[in-house]
Amino acid sequence: MRARSTLFTIFLEYVYPERRAPVRDLIAMMEVLGFSEAAVRAALSRSAKRGWVEPRRLGRLAYYALSDRVYWQVRQVRKRLYDPPSPWDGRFLLVLPEGPKERGERERFRREMALLGYGSLQSGVYLGAGVDPAATRELLAFYGLSATLFRAEHLGAKEEVLRAFLLEEASAHYQALFPQGVPEDPLGAFQALTRLVHEMRKLLFLDPLLPPELLPPNFPGLAARERFLALREVLYRRAEPFLKELSLPFSALSPQAR
């Protein structure tokens, strides 16, 4: 776990639906995860320079708040992790964007499309099942891209479609997702919970959360999601004494927070 990526997980899991958190709380949580205060402050400073967070102050209390762009990303990740899937109508969304042309930006766009549940049929052609069209248009707007979108049925075998997604890689990562034991103490539970959510959100880059009708036999994603949600609730209860020492709103610490 790297400091800046871990801070994203902290905002995602413990700060949301708020956008800002006191620096002292961020440091307290990150120190439990093994990061020094200096490392946390450096990661926040670098994130601010990239426009991911914004420093703020209320009286003598220093905060960092998520930028609009990153808050949007947090909201999309939480939807994918915690909202129940919508019924699938059997049709796919096909997206043909015009760009990006720069290689680095093109890779960032591809990863964010994967985060929304898209696979790549070929370079520059994205396919999704059960994806959110509104979030897709918002992402295109962030990149300043125009695109052609189609809703269509696939007339061949589902194996032809599944080649667009990284299901084999996702399956391998699911095998190593869960800890061997569940810590009883609050700090240990907080560590385990944060690492679990951190790894689960990274899996969204590999697992598009396809409708069950499309999944290959024995794909572990659905069972792993159920286990993740159940274990998350257990770890929250055990970590609660530590979490309540922070000045974050209690609603942000609830497993039901949306």
Image (cartoon, rainbow, N blue to C red):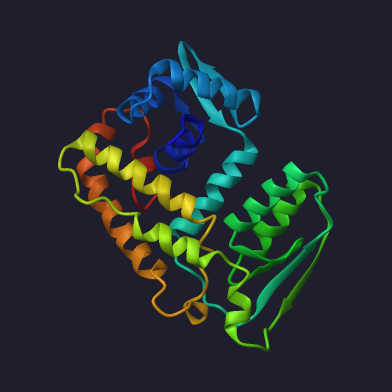
Residue at 45% x, 40% y: name it: 9
Describe residue 222's horizontal placement relative to residue 154 as left or right: left
Residue at 23% x, 34% y: name it: 187
The x and y percentages for residue 142 are: 74, 46
Q: Quadrant of residue 48?
A: top right
Front one among 221 and 226: 221
Q: Is residue 218 above or below residue 78?
A: below
The x and y percentages for residue 138 are: 70, 53
Describe residue 188's horizontal placement relative to residue 65 as left or right: left
Front one among 60 and 115: 115
The x and y percentages for residue 241 are: 21, 35
Front one among 15 and 4: 4
So how many labels did they put on this image? 0
Residue at 68% x, 53% y: name it: 110
The x and y percentages for residue 162 are: 58, 74
Q: Is residue 107 above or below residue 9?
A: below
- Residue lying at the far left in this picture: please name it: 184
Q: Is residue 213 above or below residue 106?
A: below
Residue at 34% x, 50% y: name it: 255
Q: Is residue 197 above or below residue 42?
A: below
Q: Quadrant of the N terminus?
A: top left
Describe residue 58's horizontal placement relative to residue 154 as left or right: left
Describe residue 78's horizontal placement relative to residue 151 as left or right: left
